[in-house]
Amino acid sequence: MTSSKIFSRIANQVAHAAGTPVTFIVCCLIILVWAVTGPFLGFSDTWQLIINTGTTIVTFLMVFLIQNTQNRDGAAIQAKLDELIRVSEGRNRFIGIEHLTEEEVEEFRLLCEKAAGRRDARRNDAA
């Protein structure tokens, strides 16, 4: 198994686990335990450093996992849309427009709006 597949599998599992109610409750309990221990530890710098370091590490790692899952999800959705365009009466020139610049994509969006407006106007005239 390739390292890419291993990473994807781990990223999917961690992202799924991170989004469960149990994980949220566990995190809340960790914060509660940390807060309760504050008076016993004199609200020391070490006490504060523990939560700051832990949350920073988790946040840092989760950013990359979330970005990875979003990139794969976006690519999968784009591939599905491209296939629907390819097999339908849609215009094939829309396939792959996600690789264009923001301005070029905006031109396609305006083109679609104009085409939809013309179609709606024809329907209203026929009614």
Image: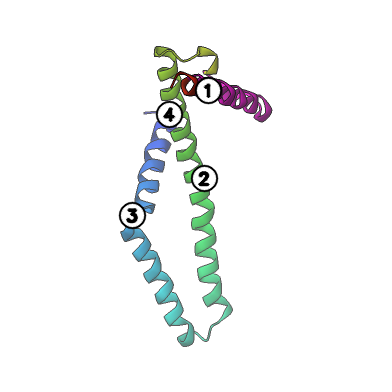
Q: Closer to the observer: label 2 or label 3?
A: 3
Q: CA distance from mark 4 to mark 1?
A: 35 Å
At 47% from the left edge and 29% from the top edge, which residue is drawn?
Answer: 75
Tag 4 residue: 76
Q: CA distance from mark 4 to mark 3?
A: 23 Å
Q: Amino acid at mark 3?
A: Thr
Name the image quarter holding residue 77: top left
Secondary structure of the residue carrying tag 3 is loop
- Sooner in the amino-acid sequence: mark 3 or mark 1: 3
If the image is split into quadrants, where does the C terminus sit? top left
Asked whether disc 4 touches disc 1, contact meaning CB atoms under 8 Å apart, the reply is no
Q: Which residue is situated farthest in the right direction here?
A: 103
Is residue 107 located in the magenta-colored stretch of the structure?
A: yes
Range drawn in magenta: 95-122
- Sooner in the amino-acid sequence: mark 2 or mark 4: 2
Q: Is residue 92 left or right of residue 16?
A: right
Tag 1 residue: 121
Q: Position of residue 63 (x, y in %)?
A: 52, 49
At 54% from the left edge and 60% from the top edge, which residue is drawn?
Answer: 56
Q: Amino acid at mark 2?
A: Phe
Callout 3 crowding tier (Cα within 10 Å): few <14, some 14–19, many ≥20: few
- Sooner in the amino-acid sequence: mark 4 or mark 3: 3
Q: Position of residue 103 (x, y in %)?
A: 68, 28
